[in-house]
Amino acid sequence: MPISKLQFKPGIHREGTTFSEGGAWYDCDKVRFRSGFPEKIGGWVRASTFFFKGVARIMWNWILLDGKDCLAIGTSKKFYIETSGIFYDTTPIRQTDTKTDPITTSTTGAFIHTYVTTNPHNSDIGDNVVLSNVANFDGLCTSTYTNPFTTTSAGSPIITVDTVTPHFAKLGETVTFSGTTGFDSIPASDFNTAHVILEIVSLTAFTITVATNATTAYLSGGGSVTAVYLSRLNREFEVLTIPTSTSFTFQTDFPATTGAVVGGGVGVVASFIVSIGQAFNSSGGGWGSGTWSRGTWSSGFAFSAYSARLWSVDNFGEDLVFCIRESPIFYWDATGGLGSRGVFLNSLVGASDVPTTVTLVMVTDERHVVAVGCTDRITTAFDPLLIRWSDQEDPLNWTPAITNTSGAQRIPMGSYTVAAIQARQETLIWTDRSLHSLQYNGAPFTFGLITLAESTNIIGPNAAVNVNNVTYWMGRDRFWVYSGRVEAMPCSIQRYIFEDINQVQASAVYAAANDAFQEVTWFYCGVGSDPNNKYVTYNYGAGVWSYGTMSRTAWAPCPGRGSLPYATDLGYADDDGSLFVHESGNDDGSTNPPSPITAFIQSADFGVGDGDKLIFADRIIPDFTFERSTIPEPSLQLTVDAKKFPGQIPKSADTDERAVSAVTSEIDQYTEQVWARLRGRQMRIKVTSTGLGVAWLMGTLRINIRLDGRQ
């Protein structure tokens, strides 16, 4: 037989066996399809050297009036605004408490102390509290050094402070020195005052400026110096234990000198941040819980007893409205600056009938703030199917009147609201068993509600995405699309994906759009995993599917940042959540230095005729391009194996003295052909890359095959 082209159907096909799917691709990881041909996906790099706390569950990109490109990131512990790689903690304060001398230090040398409040603090273990207006006492803010100052260069006022032990100071904080002896013509008074920390050199060094320039470079001095860092007490702490309703314990970076000392000063303020939430669902129930296709169609199911913290967020101009699922609405005013915190919307002056409990919040194109699943204005009872909206252009006014456009509608079917997204000229709202469209109609009713589908569902609050006016979402047992009508999407890997999902963590599913590659991706938790660790991708340009492994919990397209998508990883164990820029380079930038990305694609079995005769292959002609690689000699591994029976395991040893059943060859841009001696009824190929900086696109392989008798 002549040399034959190996042409496989684009996309992954895994609804049948590896033999029945012959002529298709069967398995892959970190591979996408371009014009029907497989290629390795792009890499990712860290977008910031800083970390955030908790598991990110929502991301939202918008631009402030001053041009700052921002990302809102809601996690299980915090709510951040990120810009230029800096995470600003904007988590709202839920209550404050003011008291004189509220802190009692523990024993001598101990780090954990007790704080007593005036009123019940309503905190849980792990919550965060910000202390302010605290005075130094019992040595908690004090450190002593010997000759800690070093000049940097002659004629410069910049001084390096070497602390020997970790200083725990941060950029921009203030430190006050006393007891210093002047040196290098710099008077003691230049040192014995308050200084702003200019640069953090290391854990044991930082820089300050003095009023007098040094005359000698790298000269050390200062004598016996006492430093006071009030920021060691005036900062955020974690609640460690809760002895009583009006007390909690916290840990400082430095120990008590004497112990059992009461202090802190007059008017100490404890600001309790909104309590932290669950990182994951910790019991059964929740969106889509249970096994795949269990129960009757559209059967009801209960929420998890301990649900993961989920957020919704939207921008109202340059400001933000956001909320935790089934909690009050928060508002962040951009005029307060990036360092300001969000506040309760109903606490603002002029607020009227703002819903006190909300499932989801969003902003329409007409600038109405919409609460989906919220408290009734009259009865104050929570209704999971009630939709309310504010007056146009006024997020504070929720009281319907003839002079405004605020109002309410109730979803006619379902048990509770699951998800909602803004599409073109409509808001799509999913309940546990239906899909509805909220459309702006103008006066007198403002909005109208249309039922689009009575027998559809969605797996979680973030499982839908709108791309080019088409909405795609993952249901509890299939994928759906809405482009004017609701339809179930044909999926060549449907059974494989839905049998692989940890349904307890179904609410963690996150839909992501990647316009540059015409892709919609859903990140999800595989069976046995609580964190998101897998993904499934639909290429809507070609109508093909792929899947793989990746730990991403939230995703946001960022048109103003080079049109590259940003994504978050976990960060739940050590509060080291990271922000990544995707489609950047070819490697895994979560490590330093970057690590290689292992990518592969494997075909289903293919053969000749009905398989009644054996086939023999002796030559493979590869077809790959490595043009996007960032190393001079990129390569990959090409494996071709042969089997006589579907259940046979291919071997790489010469077992029958005529031919081996598997061969693996290193392929680079100059490889012309691969010689082999393969014999069996069917064959398959696998392409794998494990090198740093490697990018590849596969074309059409050719193989020399001939019939080789019966057996």
Image: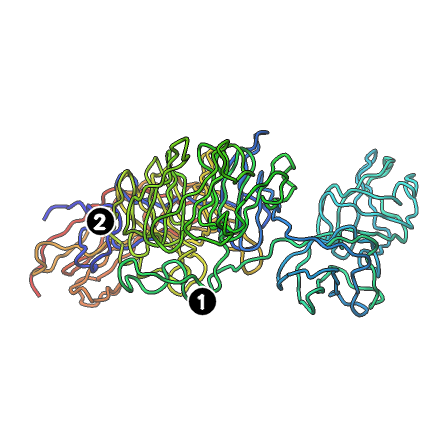
Can you say whether 304 is above or below 409 in the image?
Answer: below
Other residues around mark 1 within 10 Å, as few (<14) / some (14–19) / many (≥20):
some
The outermost residue toward the top is 66
Q: Secondary structure at mark 2?
A: strand
Where's residue 112, x and y in %?
73, 65
Q: Residue at x 70, y 53 (%)?
A: 96
Of residues 140 and 373, the one drawn nearer to the viewer in this rendering? 373
Can you say whether 684 is above or below 562 in the image?
Answer: below
For residue 620, the mark is: 2
Say if residue 445 shows up in the picture. Answer: yes
Of residues 205 and 371, the one drawn nearer to the viewer in this rendering? 371
Of residues 492 and 133, the one drawn nearer to the viewer in this rendering? 133
To which quarter of the image does residue 541 belong?
top left
Q: Residue at x 65, y 56 (%)?
A: 128
Q: CA distance from mark 2 to mark 1?
A: 52 Å
Can you say whether 479 is above or below 304 in the image?
Answer: above
Query: Dots 2 and 1: beta carbons under 8 Å?
Result: no
The quarter of the rendered structure image containing the C terminus is bottom left
Where's residue 278, x and y in %?
52, 60
Q: Secondary structure at mark 1?
A: loop
Q: Residue at x 67, y 67 (%)?
A: 242
Where's residue 241, x and y in %?
67, 67
Amino acid type shown at disc 2: Ile
Of residues 355 and 488, the one drawn nearer to the viewer in this rendering? 355
Q: Which residue is mark 1?
A: 283
Where's residue 70, x and y in %?
55, 38
Say if residue 592 shows up in the picture. Answer: no
Amino acid type shown at disc 1: Ser
* Nearest to N terminus: mark 2 or mark 1: 1
Q: Residue at x 51, y 59 (%)?
A: 279
